[in-house]
Image (cartoon, rainbow, N blue to C red):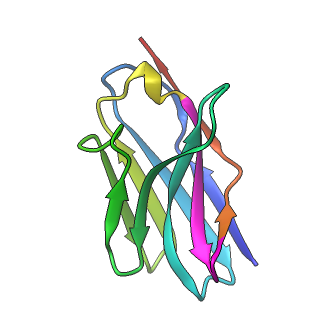
Amino acid sequence: QVKLVESGGGLVRAGESLRLSCASSGTISGITAMGWYRQAPGNQREFVAGITVGGHTNYADSVKGRCTISRDNRKNTHTLQINSLEPEDTAIYYCFVRRLNNNVWGQGTQVTVSS
């Protein structure tokens, strides 16, 4: 099994930046991709950013140009840097890893952006 633990959420002001981290532990072999989703109140969970083990990245249009996803294979972590935060970015952010054609999810970390 894979266990994911997020960190780095919090309350920030519009225009500020935040870095979210996700640490993987357990059976991490077979992971092919990792990334982040988010879910705002009353909304469905939506894709934010992803990165493959080969380093290919993908971003949602809503965060493109403001987000950078990266990974550290030695530390088994992946990180999401979000700049120029907007109140619309307020959500619970969930990290995931893709392993054996299944997504494994973290518990979520709250990001609140005040205007």
Does residue 111 appear in this view? no
Q: Nearer the viewer, residue 105 or 78?
A: 105
Q: Position of residue 61 (x, y in %)?
A: 33, 42
- Residue at position x 36%, y 63% from top? 70
Q: Nearer the viewer, residue 14 or 39?
A: 39
Res. 58 image quadrant: bottom left
Prevalent SS, magenta region: strand
Magenta-tinted stretch: 91-102
Q: Is residue 1 above or below residue 51?
A: below
Does residue 39 appear in this view? yes
Q: Position of residue 97 (x, y in %)?
A: 58, 68
- Residue at position x 35%, y 81% from top? 54
Residue extending farthest to the bottom is 29
- Say if the magenta span includes residue 92: yes
- Say if the magenta span includes residue 51: no
Q: Is residue 43 above or below residue 23?
A: above
- Residue at position x 40%, y 67% from top? 51
The mark total stands at 0
Residue extending farthest to the top is 115
Q: Position of residue 8 (x, y in %)?
A: 52, 44
- Residue at position x 66%, y 74% from top? 25
The N terminus is located in which quarter? bottom right
The C terminus is located in which quarter? top left
Left or right: 107 with respect to 16? Answer: right
Residue extending farthest to the right is 1
Q: Nearer the viewer, residue 92 or 101?
A: 101
Q: Nearer the viewer, residue 101 or 76?
A: 101
Left or right: 75 with respect to 85? Answer: right
Res. 27 image quadrant: bottom right
